[in-house]
Image (spheres, rainbow, N blue to C red):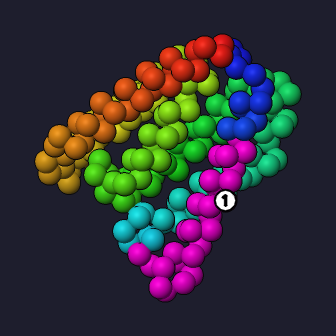
Amino acid sequence: MQLVKDRFYIWYNRVATVLGGILILLTVAAWAIPGLAFLHDRFGFIQLIGIIGVAQVIYGVAFFKRQAQTNIWVAGSLSSMILALGTIGLVQNSGQLHSWMLIGWGVQVAFSGIFGLYPVVGFDFLFTFYCVIVATGQSARNALEPVALGAVLGTYIVSAISYAIFKRLY
């Protein structure tokens, strides 16, 4: 199922591993330094986000190369899935569909095209599923505002553009 050259998947894993390390650092700082408490209060850096960051770093450093010997597409996809967990976690904890962390989600979706059509559709499905859960949840108050609908539509548009751009490299 590999679609682009190996270097794209290796590059993606390296960036994801660095981002995992940043998640760890920001989560520890948010809980250890009282002046940075706004990181967990306003931006959602709770302990679970730190644990996902640890998982991302461990996978990127210890397991990616082993999996890449078998199938580098699968190795890159797993790295992307772990990063998606962290990103969606930050979105959920920092304002849900009105979170500034949606920019990070958009960037991740923008690079999902290197994995082909199915992961692109998977990102769209994941975000649509998330939006349905948020819109119908117990604390749903005006969850389907234009900003929220724009986030969903933006995910679809960015993923389609990503697929079209990276399709040239298949």
- Describe residue 22's horizontal placement relative to residue 58 as left or right: left
Q: Quadrant of the N terminus?
A: top right
Magenta stretch: dominant secondary structure = helix
Locate residue 111, reporting x and y percent.
Answer: 56, 32
Please report the residue visible at 46 percent of the width from the left and 30 percent of the height from the top.
Answer: 123
Q: Is residue 120 visible?
A: no
Is 62 inside the magenta-drawn segment?
no
Q: Is residue 36 visible?
A: yes
Depicted 160 relative to depicted 126: above or below: above
Depicted 41 relative to depicted 93: above or below: below
Q: The magenta stretch spans which residues?
A: 13-38
Residue in front for this viewpoint, 10 or 129: 10
Depicted 131 relative to depicted 141: above or below: above
- Describe residue 166's horizontal placement relative to residue 57 as left or right: left
Locate residue 134, reporting x and y percent.
Answer: 27, 44
Please report the residue visible at 34 percent of the width from the left and 33 percent of the height from the top.
Answer: 154
* Mark 1 surroundings: few (<14), some (14-19) or many (≥20) residues within 10 A: many
Is 29 inside the magenta-drawn segment?
yes
